[in-house]
Amino acid sequence: MTSDKGSEAVLSPSNVSPVTRHSPPSPALVTGGTGFLGRKLVERLLAEGRQVAVLGRTPAPDLEAKGVRFIRASLDDAPAVEAACAGIGTVFHTAAKVGVWGRYDDFFRTNVLGTRALLAGCRRHGVAHFIHTSTPSVVYNSRDLAGADESLPLTSNCPSPYPLTKAIAEREVLAANSPGLRTVALRPHLIWGVGDPHLVPRVLARARAGRLRIVGSGKNRVDMVHVDNTVDAHLLAEKALRECHLIDDISSGRKRADGRAFFITNGEPVLLWEWINELLHGLGQPPVTKKISLGAASAVGALCEAAWRVLPVRGEPPMTRFIAAELARDHWFDLSAARRDLGYEPRVSMAAGTAELIAWYRQTGLPPA
């Protein structure tokens, strides 16, 4: 068990969650517990003395050595997924098929059918709480999102199967909310931090290879979220679900969290391309200066998509219409609901997290171009 961190001012990935402990901790199941976010969440749960099981495809001997029960299964194995929920009090569903390109059926099988199997397992085995890791791209509408809140409708028209299938999964998770199974969906945006294997390494690799272009004006504002803040949000969401029966909407102004979705960010929108160049400068790399218009990038994306459909090409296209829009448009969000109803407040700032990341890359080396 860890000591109370309520008065600690130091911000670091090892900080323990500020969630208050009012009742004996229940066993937790973390899907995707060997991924970037999932592993951080598992480590925080262990630090709080929780019993943890991980559902994943790749064994993690280091986690098992710490007492984690590893369940080797894929999300498309419905019987195994349902069985994994036995004896569990809270499911943290962080696993998903992520990407901007691929067959819709593959995304649907993992993101939708896998989530359905988990919900079925929760009902069958009496799981009390379900925290679903969603994404802000479930409200994609091809337009700027500036200060957007949770009133936006879920997308039904997107050129990428990932947001479409995550939107279906989120809708079903929230519809499953009941007195016996409290559910909530969190929408963290662009998770980053030390150890990130995807977002920042891909940006750095493309920049170092001279393959990164500023799309649009370069003045678009974007929200991001540090991985430690994202873990905080997941634990606070679980706490909010436990306390649903205690909340008086009228007297406190706080609303119940169950059956709802929440945007989760650092609350500090950055000029995307300025932040990328700040990171490159801190690592002794030249800035990104070459530009391409959004219209031209979208046209290139459409051509790449067509080529990837008919040619035997592996991997993701270098540009898609969805990527072009994400790199050029505003997408930052209103945190009012998460602050009020989850008690969420980002602890690791953009400045502190960026400095920590630069120091880490200086020590460990940059990803290959």
Image: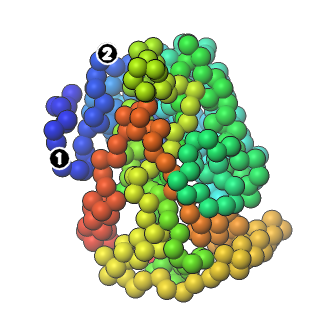
Residue 251's disc is: none
* Residue at the outermost front position: 251
Quadrant of the rendered image containing residue 73: top right
Judging from the image, what secondary structure is the residue with disc 1 in? loop
In the image, 225 versus 280, the foreground residue is: 225
Quickly name the residue at label 2: 23
Farthest residue to the right: give it: 310
Q: Residue at x 44, y 50 (%)?
A: 265
Q: Quadrant of residue 349?
A: bottom left
| Residue 193 seen by the camera | yes
**Above/below status of 340 relative to 177:** below
- Residue 264 at x, y percent in the picture: 46, 45
The amino acid beneath tag 1 is Ala
Instruction: Give the answer, above or below, for where 294 lies relative to 118.
Output: below
Which kind of residue does numbered mark 2 sit on? Ser
Q: Which mark is nearer the camera, 2 or 1?
A: 1
Picture layout, residue 292 above or below residue 221: below
Query: Mark 1 — residue?
Result: 9
The image shows residue 314 at horizontal and vertical percentages of 69, 66
In this rendering, position of residue 367 left or right of residue 101:
left
Query: Horizontal placement of 246 versus 211: left or right?
Result: left
Disc nearer the start of the sequence (2/1): 1
